[in-house]
Image: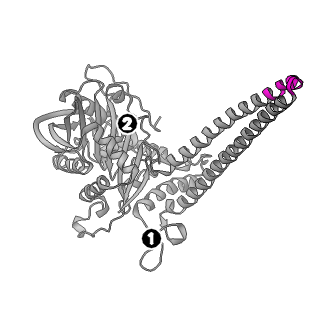
Amino acid sequence: MLRIRGGVGGISFAFEELLAGAAALDGVVRQLQDVEAEADAVRQALFPYQPDSYISGSSAITSVGEGGRAVGRVRSDLARMAGDVRASHREYEFTEARNALFPGLGVHGSGYGSGTGDFGLPQLYVRDVVEGGIVMASRNLAMLLGLPAAPDGSAGAAGGPADVRRIIRELSAAPGLEFLQPRPVRIAGEETGMEDADLSPAGLLLRAEAVGRTKGDIEVLQIANGSQRAWVVIIPGTQTDGLPAGTNPFDEAGIAEALGYGSAETNAAVREALHRAGAEAGEQVAAVGYSQGGIHAMNLSQDRDFLAEYDLKFVLTAGSPVGGIEPAPGISSLHLEHEQDWVPGADGVPNPDTKERVTVTLTNPLEIPPPDEFGLGPGHSLDNYAEGAGAVAASRDPSLQASTAALAAVVGTAGAATVTRFSLRRDAAPVRHGAVMAPGPRRDRDGTRAQRQSLGPLD
């Protein structure tokens, strides 16, 4: 039920290994060239001494010459091998690009390197259809308006993650949609207790489900992992009711803040929650989020203020559109998606395939719920993702083993934890003469104006 991209078993890391191997062979070839040249110099230096002892002198000259030629043959073989490795890399890269062409448009079939439906027809996977549709929609809109397309097709009018974020910002500036603009998020209450915690990927996702039952809450876990402390931040998915309109930081406006503004206000509240829980500068942190919460969690990985204070080591997301977020170096992440969940494709870009970033696409069959329980679709079910996380932990795939080991290295697998629930509230939008006004700059805890920066593609 798992399709796996990225990690140490991923194709991109394999490409890196191929190129690194070719470069290493090139280095050996250069060394052998030097040895070959030195052997020839020794051979020529022996010529003046050949008359002193013709038999032994001739034998020495011949031996040095044969040794130089043997080195030359090895050098030639290694140079050819390096060329073959590079050719293999090019062929793999071409094949991967070809294989990604049709699935990127949401079309899968035996002619495109994947399975077919019951009647031999290409299968359509909701996640890929939505992702490809968003990219194509922005390109088609650019053509309709006569706007130039970006040469690389990754930004500007040509579509891609930067466009989604720009569109959100433009929408939030439109009259009547100012409520989508970020506003300060504060901590309204907290409650601390001790409990045994399942710190496996499945256990952490189930905690996100439990946190989501109370509106506007996040959870901070203090873990004693060996001789050092570690911290886990749990962020829930989108919540549409239960609090006064606009005050829940995880409502629809929270999606706009996460996708369009890098979660600046929510991230600041997460930092404050860690402070209040007792986390000290430099301590290791893992962030876990479901749906919208996964975007906030992943945005921590590119938040300069957060990373300057805490050592974020791992991010776990489920059903979250995070392909356009580029984490800082050294941060590992595991992303769970389902092929029939459209939400992870909502930013219009797939998750990158890198050594430290693993994406697992669940392919298990789903039961269609009644219409009144359909919600965002069965593919977006957190219970389904928790089941998938259990399969991830049991897998022998090298990418998944390395990823789950990276998480366990930070938090362990189970044990006693100090759990603090924080209730977050967004400031109400100021109203003047019946119109919603844009809020002023958020103030930091010391009252100074916050200067927030982003490492992501929003700048």
Residue 36 disc label? none
Give 171 or 330, whichever is nearer the viewer: 330
What's the distance in space between the residues labelled 2 and 1, CA to CA? Answer: 35 Å
Residue 95's quadrant in the figure? bottom right
Furthest-bottom residue in view?
119
The mark that comes first in sequence, 2 or 1, is 1
Residue annotated with mark 1: 123
**Residue 291 image position (x, y, % from top left):** 31, 50
Is the residue under label 1 in contact with that under label 2 (CB below 8 Å)? no
Give 22 or 58, whichever is nearer the viewer: 58
**Residue 28 image position (x, y, % from top left):** 64, 36
Residue annotated with mark 2: 301
Q: Residues within 10 Å of mark 2 (few under 14, many from 20)?
A: many
Q: Is residue 49 magenta?
A: yes
Residue 386 shown left or right of residue 451 in the figure? left
Q: Which residues are magenta?
A: 42-53
Residue 30 shown left or right of residue 453 in the figure? right
Q: Main secondary structure of the magenta part?
A: helix
Residue 350 shown left or right of residue 283 in the figure? right
As shown in the figure, which amino acid type bears the numbered disc 1?
Gln
Residue 303's quadrant in the figure? top left
What residue is drawn where x is 27% and y is 70%? 367
Give 87 or 230, whichever is nearer the viewer: 87
Give 403 or 133, whichever is nearer the viewer: 403
**Residue 89 image position (x, y, % from top left):** 60, 50
What residue is drawn where x is 44% and y is 53%? 5
Where 158 falls versus 275 (above or below)? below
As shown in the figure, which amino acid type bears the numbered disc 2?
Ser
**Residue 407 image position (x, y, % from top left):** 30, 42
What sort of colour scheme is used for the picture? Answer: one colour
